[in-house]
Every structure is written in structure tokens, then in C-alpha cells.
Image: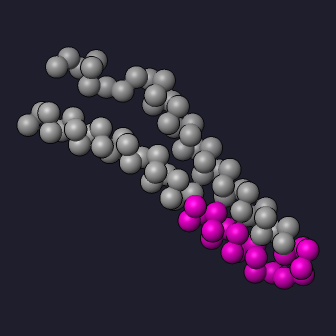
Amino acid sequence: MSQKSEMLPLKVIVGMSLQLGFSVAATTILFVYGGHWLDEKYGTNYLFWLGLTLGLIVSLYLVWKIVQPLQAIAQRESKKEL
């Protein structure tokens, strides 16, 4: 196989990188802001930390779902080389 056919196109790599960055940033910011807003509304001081924790957990899950297809492609390519 030629080297060009084994590599992912640049636009796929850039797209997945943007998707990773946006999903991590957006979910974390959304959950943190939601926790802060609830803290101000109800006069508590722990919902911010709960929002941060949930935001990071959801972000990790989204990263795992985005990277999973790339791992499948890498495994297929490594099996082809054997």
C-alpha cells in the first residue's frame, strides 16, 4: 500500500480535532455555568463543584466516543500490516 492511502485526510483530522476541543470546552463551560447559576439561585456553594465534576465526566465520555472510531481504524491498519 502506498503511504497516502494509509493516512487519514487532513480535513478529517482537523474536523475531529475541532470536534474534540469544542465538545470538551462547551460541555465543561455549560455544566460549570449551570452549577454557578444554581448556587446563586439557591444560596448554596457546592453545585458549582458538582457542575464541574459532571462536566468533566461528560467531556471524558464524549472524547471516548470520538476517539473510538480512530482506534478501530488503527487496529484495522495494524492487522493489514501483519
Main secondary structure along the magenta-highlighted residues? helix
Q: Is residue 55 left or right of residue 62?
A: right
Quadrant the N terminus occupies: top left
Residue name at image x 30 percent, y 38 percent: 73
Q: Based on the displayed image, in which of its 4 quarters is residue 21 positioned?
A: top right
Residue name at image x 62 percent, y 70 percent: 53
Residue 4 in magenta? no
Q: Is residue 21 left or right of residue 4?
A: right
Magenta-tinted stretch: 39-58
* x and y, in percent, of residue 50 in the image: 69, 75
Quadrant the C terminus occupies: top left
Residue name at image x 56 percent, y 40 percent: 19
Up the image or down, 27 lies above or below 5; here it is: below
* x and y, in percent, of residue 80 in the image: 14, 33
Residue name at image x 45 percent, y 54 percent: 64
The extreme left residue here reads 82
Q: Is residue 61 left or right of residue 76?
A: right
Q: Is residue 47 left or right of residue 59?
A: right
Up the image or down, 60 lies above or below 45; here it is: above
